[in-house]
Image (cartoon, grey):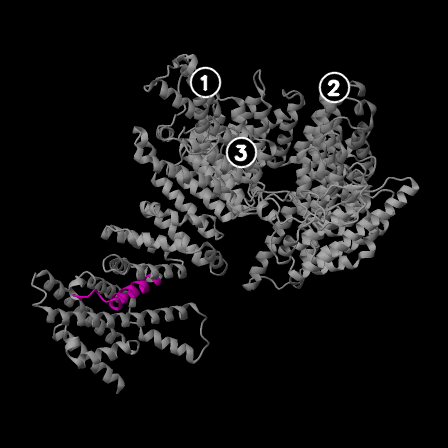
Amino acid sequence: DDVDDVRECVDRTTRALCDADAEVLVRDEGVFADVFVLCRDFIDLAPVERIRLIDALCSNLSVLSASVTALVVGGARAEEHAETMAGYRSALKAYATFIFHACELCEKEARTNSAMALGEKPAPGAKGKKKTTAKAKLVEWKWDEQRERIVHVMAGALDIDLWQVFRPRQPEEDFLRLFVRLGSMCLENPAALKSRVTKQAAFEMLGSCALKWGQLEQVTTALIDLLNKFEHLPAPIAELASAAADRFENAHLAAALIREVGRVDPYDYKVQQASDAVGVRSVGTFLGEIAARMPKTTMTNISVLMPHLDGEAYSLRSAIVSVLGHLVISQKDVASVSDHHDNATAPLLRTKQGFLDLLVERVHDTSAFTRARVLNTWATMAEAKAIPLSHWLVVTDLAIGRLNDKGALVRKAAMGLVASLLGFNPFAPQLPSAAFAESLKDYEAKLAAMTPPPAPHLEVIEEESDAEASENINGDEVQSQKTQTEGADDAEQEEAPKAPEGDAEATIQLNGGLEAARTMVAALKTALGFTVQLSGTVGVLCNLLTSGVASDVTESIGLLVRMRQFNVDGSTEGVRRLLGLIFSRDQAIKDAVVEAVDVLYLSNAESPMIAAAGLSELAATAALGELASLEDVLKALVLSGRLPPNGAVMKTLWSDVANEECSNNRKAAALNVLTMCARTNPEIIRGHLGTVCAAIDASLAGEKKSPILCRAACCALTVVRGKEGSTLELSHPVFAELAKVLHPGAPLSGRAWFPSAEQAIAALYSLHPDPEHAASEVIKAFAAATFSGNSMDKIPTAILARFLFVLGEVSLKHLVHVEQLARAVRQARIARDRKAAEAKEKGEGDDDLTAAMGQGAVGEDLLLDAAREKAEGELLATKQGATRGLVAVYAPFVVQLCSHPSVTQGPELLRGAALAALTRFMVLDAKFCEDNLKLIFTRLKGESDKGTRAALMVALGDLAFRFPNAVEPWTEHLYGIKEWGNSLHDPDASVRQHAITVLSHLVLNDMMKVKGHISEMARCLEDVDPRVASVAKLFFHELSHKHGNPIYNLLTDLLSRLSADETITPDAFKRIMTRLVGFIDKDRQAESICEKMCARFAEAVLADTPKPARDVAFCISQLTLSERAFKKFTEAWKMYEAALYDHEVHASFVTMCAKQKRNAKAEAKQFIDAFETKINEAHVEKAAAYNVSARAEGKETVTVTALAVEDEADDDGAADGEQPDTEKNEENDGTPDKDRQESVPAVVGVDQENVAPPLEGKAPTTPEAKSPARRSRRGGAAK
């Protein structure tokens, strides 16, 4: 019944509204009552009933608006239609009220439904049914569509002349407030703003109320309130203010909003920042948006915002920085107007200069977010060409300086700024410094020729003028400049010099005469300075490539690529450095490296020939490690399809290899690139074997042999087979070409033959159907050439070295070949078993019990392993009864040769070849390895050639991987502790680098136990060669990430060994231990380490010198202790009390207390202060007692530390948790700073005879000198 009554009421009401005129709502009390009830219970109406009621009300409001407009436009006197206008007024208010009420209810319902949709799913039962029913009820009700119609009609109601409607009074505020609230509701809903109609209508309502109907204050208050509550509104509100200003030609709304923001006290924003950061951020975003849309209005009201630039709400400071940037951009053409010396533009120029000064200053803001915003603002200005040329070098220097900022966000913004300055520079598309230096020299010569000789009485004046111009152009000091200077600056910005092309001796044409020549010289100086600054940035970016923050690495890669595109000096080396990042674990970094190579050499290349030439040049000039990196990059490009196997670049590379006019080095580089790509797709080489054979033949023919081309071609043959490819036929011409390389009389001379022979043997084993027979023939040929007709003492060194090299290389390759065959057999057996299992599942196989139990597979694996071991044993035939293999007969000869005096004291080439052959033989058999390890270490100790020593260290690493049990007894020799092993102490840096790299791999791969010997590697952290130190740092970093953090277990032993090492200076010891202690990041581990180190004081205080106690105290001070661990440390007072007589031990504990107080609570700080006082008193007492005893015994007395006095106010501030001024200001601009020692209360009664200076940064004072002055900004005491 109720439903029928409601439906009847809706029918009756809508019929009455549609049949009669619009005034029926106020004229008929029954209709008014029905509409009132229906709007009150609008939510309970059915969808159809809602739509009918809304249609009736909106239609009548539209008709009413038209009627009022017609009456006003008719021109009749107001007295004649006063009664009619009164009816219209009442009806207008009624319709607006009812529609607003219905709209408000619908908005609440929409928010509720949206919250339910985002909430958790209801439990099964009644709630789920209720939700389904509600959804079915609203299936026809689309509030977004209805909202569009309502706000459109309501906005139209404000277009009528309300002054005539409400005459003689003003439009009622309650009536206008309905429209303000309706517009605010539309802005609150992000979905509503997606509708262009709704957003436009809301803007019209709020703009009309503010600027047309006198509700500016109410609208401003409402918008500011919305701005603080909703994060999506800054841009729409700025758009609203701009649209209102355009529509009504009145910017009062925007000005009022800006003034309302600026009127708030900066402290209030600080408080709001802590409680509601979103609100402050929204206000800041709005300021930036309004400045971009309405710069003139913002400029007029900028004074109310400037106090907030020094406020403590960083979001607002960042926003005002953006505002200043938009204002400078809006005034970028002001200086050109001043060329005519118009005094009206002088204030604008001064204002612009002030803004630029503020932006330069704000780059040192305390907040990293604000510093990043400043840099981003400068980048936006650079893109808009709004940076004057006089500031170009200043801004570049700021950006480069911020590359070392503490904040990753700031570093990213700094790299973005450098990229913007580079991309939008006004100088030239290519920025090599040599071109600008040459151009500057030419223009200076021209200027000198054009400049008339100065008069004697004007000489001093002109010198001063030139000095001022130089300072202004180069931007050494950012200061206010005269109008004429600013005009010249922007004129230079608009017509910046380009690097001259063509003949450098060409005549310089300057239409502007002397003044133009001066301008050009000044601009070229700026350009040259800019290029020099950029070239100096490459080293910083290369350091950032090793950062642990992914954004630093990716941004550095992008900037280095950008610099390479602009041909900045040193950028090529930077690109080579970034190639190694292809091995990064972060996929984003790997993708960035691949993208960099693609951008530099492929996608942006003008033609395939240029792309091929670029890749060839990169491969030709790359080092060994860079080649490995480049290979992985090219494989990724091939897999991704950006370097297709049959593409134009590949065809161009093959044409370079086949082209006889190309140099052999270029052919070799092209072949290297093709080989790298072929490791992913062997068909790239397989289809061009004839070209590769021709390259080998060309490298060995003619007067100028090319070992580089020969090696590249043989290396290309090693990838032809791939993983699943087949071997070639015996008649294939490839083997004939390989035979030329592996012939004893090969035309390649000296050391150049060995790399080619290595790749040729690898290709032989990869492609030959019977590599064992082919290798035996090669060995026989070399043996015949070596021993036929020659006595042992007359064998040529070169022939013997080649023979030894072939022996060693063939033995190693044959071992790999045997393992590959065993692996292939095992994989075939696995595939067979898999097929059998699949067949059995389908019911097709035999039900074999042995196969079902897997016994057949186990038996086959045992037989396979036995066959493999037998084949490997035959190589050296060390076991009794074993068949002699390929090189077994020569093994004794090689052993004797390595210990023969004629070899050990002979040429380096022969010694290296003999030792290389021996180490390769040792890889074949464990017994042979054990028998000859002593010989290897003997040769390592006595070898004079650094290259051979490095190669022996690498070979020992391989042997440790192959036979760890055999090498384990020689571990101390590997570390260099025993006399036979000294590689970590080798005088040559390259040998030390090889040694620590090998040991790092052995330890990290668990092939060598981590023992106390690792202290020798810790010493390498302070190696004079940065390459050795960097490997050591990387080793300990990776070691700390292993399970259980082995550094924790080794730290105390490392402390003992390093402290006892007299070759390590105290400063070096501190640096080493600081790095090692930094890897202890767990509270329990730090607590345990602290206990162990405290126990060492008992032995340390008994030493002859205080050094052991100092070292232990320093290590304890570097630990990050929890509150519990620190209390345990204080409870161990008896352990270290005796060592407190030493001032360095005392200083370490004082530093430790200061570090603990930084993040401690108030109660904990009081405890730390009490303990610190106890330490100070004990230090004075123990030192005085020691000095008395020392004087009596005639020993040297110790120093007593006098500490600075903190005034009471500072102590109170520290107790309240207030950060000291020193820390606040030293961490102001985010610049990395050194470790600082905090001040502590002074101790009275010290022995004045031996008083050490106070801790760093503190001036000595006395307890009586209590001054109210605070410390200076950099931590010095007030004087």
State which region is magenta.
166-188
Q: Is residue 254 magenta?
A: no
Q: Is residue 1274 above or below residue 1135?
A: above
Q: Amino acid at mark 2?
A: Pro
Tags 2 and 1 in contact by the CB under 8 Å rule?
A: no
Image quadrant for the C terminus? Answer: top right
Mark 1 neighbour density, 10 Å: few (under 14) some (14–19) many (20 or more)? few
- What residue do we see at 47% from left, 60% from top? 276
Give the residue pinned by disc 2.
Answer: 796
Give the residue pinned by disc 3.
Answer: 538
Q: Amino acid at mark 3?
A: Val
Tags 3 and 1 in contact by the CB under 8 Å rule?
A: no
Q: Determine whether the residue tagged by mark 1 lies in a helix, strand or loop.
A: helix
Res. 1276 image quadrant: top right
Give the residue pinned by disc 1.
Answer: 460
> Can residue 730 be seen in the rendering of this structure?
yes
- The x and y percentages for residue 78 are 10, 65
